[in-house]
Amino acid sequence: MPGTPSEKNPATKGRRFFQKLSYKFYARGAELNHWFRRRVRPPGIALMILIVVAAGAAAGNAEAPVFQAFSLVCGLLMTGLFMLLFRRASLEATRELPAHATAGQPVTYHITLHNRSRRPLKRFQLQETPPDPRPDEATFRLSVEPGEKQRNFFDRTFAYYRWQWLCDTRLLFDGGRSQVIERLGTTAHIPVTQTPRRRGLVRMNDLRVLLPDPLGIFQRCVKVSAPPSLLAVLPRRYPLPRFELPGSARFQPGGEATARHAGSTGEFTGLRDYQSGDPLRLIHWKTWARTGKPVVIELEDTFFPRHGLILDTFPAPGDEDLFEDAVSVAASFVVAVDSRESLIDLMFIAGQERVVTAGQGIARAETLLEVLAGVESTPDEDFDSLAKLVRRHADDLAGCLCVFAGWSESRAKLLQQLNRQGIETSAMVIVREKPDAAPRCHFLRSADLAGDLMKLPRRL
């Protein structure tokens, strides 16, 4: 709080002033670097370096070749700048995005580009610019880079590697640049490929056209008029071996309502009068024609397993990367489980209790993936509420698979509580280093997550 002794400490005030000054320097420098790199091409950077070298050589050497090289480089730069004045464009665009993308996998979409000028546009590129990845001052000051304590005093003081780490983790996608388009008349459909780096929603609202000068030294960067678009990025998934979820041998009655949604049928048991809401496929048309009253086929209840997928949303400070891995592991199991033969209840705490069900025609697995794409971690640990949530649905579940972001006594206690309730459970625990073995726990190293997943036993 303001006014506390630590705030009044001169050393603390001096440290905060230095951090504020460092933040402004890094933020301004990143902004200038971004502006420069979008307008100066690699040959231009090489010529600028060459002109500095030539100027230094000319200062101590009066020979003609040095001055000639200096003059040539200056002439090329001036010519490129002059010709850049004639590169103009007036464009409108519409993005045609896919329904989903996946973190870490390239996605290609098309941009419909309209030329509003009467003259054709020659030799250009489209570039999709991601949202600004620079953190705010509070985030820069309070964050701690993984492994920062092992760095030397200079690096810890100036925190440049922390700034790089924050900008890198906040960058939403790589790429986003089209191939060089030689000529645009009126309309064209241009493919653009980018690779989302994080799950969630990617907002695209900065489409630019890059217009290089004929010498390829500089380029004009003009914003294209295009409505903003959102791309839903699903969590990264990993291949899994053949497995059986806990409680797979237990089956739950699906009931008539679930059977209607799923379209599954049991054995024929008889005929009954039609009731409002009965599907047309169950009408027995011959009996209706004979009796004059609508009659439907009555089928026995179908049975199927119902599994709980419990996601830990309480990572410890500094374990946010383990939480992202936990979301990816949960998404991998969502895809691997045959939702046509079972139901999956995704349970987690995100400000409030959340239960989302998919399978057996109620909802597709993509519904759970979309939920996982937007789930956020919770700073306050509350495993008691999570245990109560699971216990309320225990009678409907054949078993539970828990996915933990780290390992602690509170997580072990949660497993013990569920086991005492008679719920068959198993846990996937994402860790940096494997601890001692625990019953019904499978420890997965974040450094080799894909390899450890493929080593899982058949019976989880």
Image: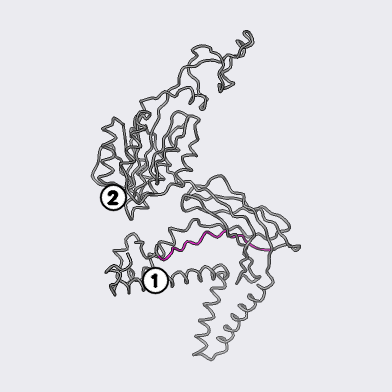
**Residue located at (50% from left, 86% from top):** 57
Residue projecting furthest to the left: 436
Q: Nearer the viewer, residue 7 or 356?
A: 7
Mark 1 vs mark 2, CA separation in Å: 36 Å
Q: Position of residue 105 (x, y in %)?
A: 49, 49
Residue projecting furthest to the right: 118
- Secondary structure under tag 1 reads helix
**Residue located at (50% from left, 89% from top):** 59
Q: Position of residue 352 (x, y in %)?
A: 40, 44
Name the disc covering residue 433, or none. Answer: 2
Q: Position of residue 70 (x, y in %)?
A: 57, 83
217 over 148 or under it: above or below: below
Q: Nearer the viewer, residue 61 or 277?
A: 277
Is 234 in the magenta? no
What residue is shown with label 1?
20
Stretch of the chain drawn in magenta: 122-137
Q: Residues within 10 Å of mark 1 (few under 14, many from 20)?
A: some
Locate residue 255: give its quadrant.
Answer: top left
